Image: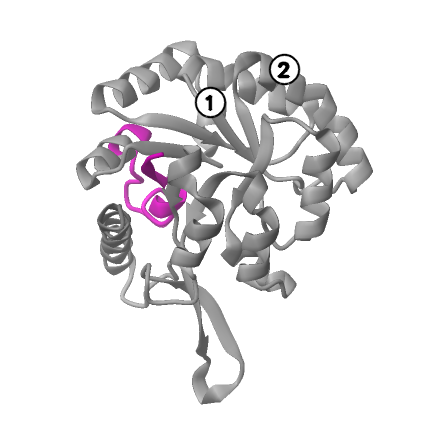
Amino acid sequence: MAYGISTYAYFWRISGRAPRPMTLTEMLRDTAELGGRVFQICDYTPLLSYDSAQLADVRATARDLGLTLELGTRGIGPRHLLAFLDKAGELGVTLVRSMLNTAGHWPGTAEAVTLLKESVPRYEEAGVTLGLETYEQVSTDDLLTVVRGVGSEHLGVVLDPGNSVARLERPADVVAATAPHVVNIHVKDFAFTRRDGWVGFTYAGCPLGEGLLDYDGMISAVRPAERGLNQIVEHWLPWQDEGYDATARLEHQWTQHSINTLLRSE
């Protein structure tokens, strides 16, 4: 087991709002400096255009920094997943996170099982595990129906209990249901705050340990140290009214706080 950081922890610093978005190399170096040992390149569009030489450079940089790489994408189309399996091979990756839906494809459980049975055997052969993330577009029951329907040790769940709240699923219930199938954990805390005038709520991120995430309960149920599962820091940091500099500064502080908190929990 190791603690790491996702590209989602750099959400604003690699966005179009950044005067100069951080590069992948800069994120890798920052992760190592903060004490992370894993970097999950998740939904990072520039990676799609990387050729073999560029992928080799990323792999070498991560190796030199002592980092393990993981990949993240969306969708379960066999052609797409096999293309990411190729990238995983070039990067030395053994964990790929995906999600059932894309903007143009929302498969039902039966179709999802059929599609995954085309690509998961290739993942097995390569020694790569595919993890499907918990999130509000798909019920946890349906996600588990798909995982069980495929029936492979190389297909599991990427647990992010905060995502499913928008589907009115309790984080504790999501953790309990998925625990035996979890292959990777996204660690981010979350909270509700009242809107101005007490008209409704905002559901957003907060520093780890200050919100509704029962981290200790999640770890007790999933047992990542015993099972060798990595924990990856993410954020839901709202844009700050003071602008980019304040937002970027706070994003860095949250990341540092999360990694420090996880390291202290060992």
| Residue at position x 31%, y 46% in the image | 13
C-alpha distance separating marks 2 and 1: 13 Å
Q: Nearer the viewer, residue 149 or 94?
A: 149
Residue 11 is a magenta residue? yes
Magenta span: 1-26
| Residue at position x 28%, y 55% in the image | 254
Number of residues whose C-alpha sits closer than 10 Å to that of mark 2, classed few (under 14), some (14–19) or many (20 or more)? some
Which quarter of the rendered picture does the C terminus lie within?
top left
Mark 2 vs 1, N-terminal side = 1
Q: Position of residue 103 (x, y in %)?
A: 66, 43
Q: Nearer the viewer, residue 72 or 43?
A: 72
Which quarter of the rendered picture does the N terminus lie within?
top left
The relative height of residue 208 versus residue 152 in the rendered view (above or below) is: below
Number of residues whose C-alpha sits closer than 10 Å to that of mark 1, classed few (under 14), some (14–19) or many (20 or more)? some
Q: Secondary structure at mark 2?
A: helix
Horizontal side of residue 38 vs 144, given as left or right: left
Horizontal side of residue 253 vs 16, given as left or right: left
| Residue at position x 49%, y 18% in the image | 87
The relative height of residue 240 versus residue 120 in the rendered view (above or below) is: below
Residue identifier under label 2:
122
Residue identifier under label 1:
94
Report whether residue 252 is seen: yes
Residue type marked 2: Arg
